Image (cartoon, rainbow, N blue to C red):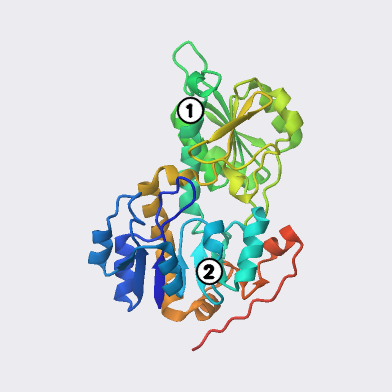
Amino acid sequence: MIIGVPKEIKNNENRVALTPAGVRELVAHGHKVYVQATAGAGTGFSDDEYIAAGAAILPTIEEVYAIAEMVIKVKEPIKPEYGLIRKGQVLFTYFHFASDRELTESMIASGAVCIAYETVRLANGSLPLLVPMSEVAGRMSVQEGCRFLEKPQGGRGILLGGVPGVKPAKVLILGAGVVGRNAALMAAGLGADVTITDISLPTLRHVAETMPRNVKTLFSSRHNIEAELPATDLVIGSVLIPGAKAPHLITRDMLKLMRPGSLLVDVAIDQGGCFETSVPTTHSEPTYTVDGIIHYAVANIPGAVPYTSTLALTNATLPYAVQLADKGWRRACGEDRALEQGVNIVDGRVVFPAVAEAWGLPLSKLELYTTD
């Protein structure tokens, strides 16, 4: 198979979809890999390293899309890429269709096969291609929270862990999934007073048994969240419904319960955001203020630490990319139930229920085969 790796062109997205080691693995399986020039520069990989691994370098993104049977990316295509995608071409990347109607309609119109990292799902319900970036985003949410609570950044001027004689900041984490647990570990390690919420009592029991003593659990309800907000300095929203829009757990009228200069970090912004007042931001302009409350809603948080993020992501995605290349997407998905659930759009038809539901589109049956 001919595989293309374009350079990411989303604002401040420095990750790359394949490392030179990943290229070497695909080449060893008999595939041809084309990498756009400087695609790995933001992560620290040179064109020469890709060439040494067996890739060919193409100067433009147009050439990469034109030659590739399968395009492997990190983030969803954006407008300049829509016209480069063709019928039958396989795209393997994060899509988050339920939060972007224009992207959904553009991929339907393209006739491409869209396989989304975020909906590949194992039998136990875990999301193996979302987990590594959720781990990074969870930890980064606290790191960015510390930064934007500083007075020069517009925050209340609070040190997350406090000092002897001064209480630490209070952190409220909505959702005890991978993002939430990693955020809790990071915030607790810095000495913050942490409360983590969820609607699953078994999950809360597990968190209570495994987290440091400065992490408290709370059942997630509007009443409980409202009761926490007046004393909370940093709220991290990490609620996930795989492939679907995130629910709004903090509405605009709830902002008045918080102190001016407090901070909301919406890690769920890729799926529409879990705060009513959230709109996507970028690393170049990461925050804005609503009713005195700072909002951080960067849609590609892990892009700020591209070296760590790229290695973590490709560790997870490469085995699936090899399957797709070796077997073709229909057979690979037919033989791997987890990978099958990653297929969202095929030949102009939506085949993933949450995407069809999000935009009121007809849902088609996914047709696969398991033999050559």
At x 69%, y 36%, the residue is 277
Which of the image's four quarters has the N terminus? bottom left
Q: Residues within 10 Å of mark 2 (few under 14, many from 20)?
A: many
Residue 229 versus residue 70 in the image, above or below? above
Residue 137 versus residue 316 in the image, above or below? above
What's the CA distance linking mark 2 and mark 1?
40 Å
The residue that mark 1 highlights is 146
Residue most extreme to the top: 165
Element carrying mark 2: loop
* Amino acid type, callout 1: Cys
The residue that mark 2 highlights is 85
* Amino acid type, callout 2: Ile
At x 40%, y 71%, the residue is 3
At x 56%, y 19%, the residue is 156
Residue 161 is labelled as: none
Q: Residues within 10 Å of mark 1 (few under 14, many from 20)?
A: many
Would residue 121 be visible to someone looking at this image? Answer: no
Residue 132: image x %, image y %? 46, 52
At x 63%, y 64%, the residue is 106
Element carrying mark 1: helix
Residue 18: image x %, image y %? 37, 61
Residue 358: image x %, image y %? 72, 58
Tell which of 81 and 235 is nearer to you.
81
Residue 152: image x %, image y %? 48, 20
Image depth: mark 2 or mark 1 in front: 2
Tell which of 83 and 131 is nearer to you.
83
